């Protein structure tokens, strides 16, 4: 947090499950923090986190359509309501498997939910009540690295992805549907 140009730091000593944070979502009252070992939450004005669930290999967390969307490194995803009082009970043992991959991450881009993995790109179907991903692009394509450091869509609908390791900026030239 920033108060009068001062930063406060939160670690496992404050209740986080790991110091390796992979996603943060804030709503009107709560802060949700995903680390590579699980999900924790706190009220915005508090400094002590409560464990929601230990989830080894958690790789990302975003907010989409009033839900928290969690993703594991292996491509499993889960969308759950962000209702703190019932959140622990709503995380099932079985998650939806999007791809057989490693290095999977969910990201929001122009109000759309994407899954990026070494198996390719997937986009969530906007009309579904449940979050379901489908492969994006005509052919099976992969990135040179699973660590996406930059992501953008240009005015012609091309998806640009920059990777931190092993290589170049990639572009998906197929135009996005309207």
Image (tube, rainbow, N blue to C red):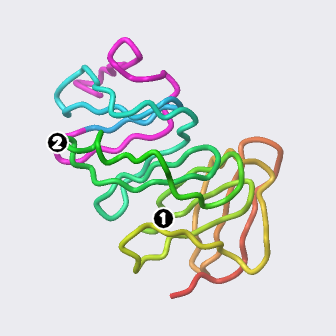
Residue 22 is a magenta residue: yes
In the picture of the structure, the residue carrying the numbered disc 2 is: 29
Residue 7 in magenta stretch:
yes
Q: Residue at x 23, y 24 (%)?
A: 4
- Answer above or below: position of 131 versus 46: below
Give coordinates of residue 84: x percent, y percent.
22, 42
Q: Residue at x 50, y 88 (%)?
A: 178
Left/right placement of residue 13 relative to residue 29 reads right
Which numbered dot is residue 4? none
Q: Residues within 10 Å of mark 1 (few under 14, many from 20)?
A: many
Q: Which residue is mark 1?
A: 113
Residue at position x 19%, y 24% in the image:
46
Q: Is residue 51 left or right of residue 46?
A: right
Question: Is 26 displayed left or right of 152 in the figure?
Answer: left
Quarter of the rendering occupied by the N terminus? top left
Residue numbers of the magenta segment: 1-30
Q: Residue at x 40, y 48 (%)?
A: 92
């Amino acid at each position: 947090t920033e108060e009068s140009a001062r930063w406060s730091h939160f670690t496992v000593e404050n209740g986080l499950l790991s110091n390796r944070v992979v996603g943060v979502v804030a709503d009107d009252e709560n802060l949700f923090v995903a680390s590579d070992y699980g999900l924790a939450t706190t009220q915005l004005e508090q400094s002590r986190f409560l464990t929601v669930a230990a989830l080894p290999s958690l790789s990302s967390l975003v907010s989409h359509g009033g839900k928290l969307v969690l993703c594991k490194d292996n491509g499993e995803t889960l969308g759950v309501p962000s209702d703190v009082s019932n959140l622990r009970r709503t995380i099932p043992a079985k998650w939806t498997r999007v791809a057989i991959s490693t290095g999977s991450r969910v990201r929001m881009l122009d109000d759309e939910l994407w899954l990026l993995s070494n198996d390719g790109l997937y986009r969530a179907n906007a009309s579904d009540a449940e979050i379901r991903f489908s492969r994006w692009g005509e052919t099976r394509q992969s990135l040179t690295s699973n660590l996406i450091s930059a992501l953008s869509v240009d005015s012609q609908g091309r998806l640009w992805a920059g990777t931190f390791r092993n290589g170049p900026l990639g572009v998906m030239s197929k135009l996005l549907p309207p």
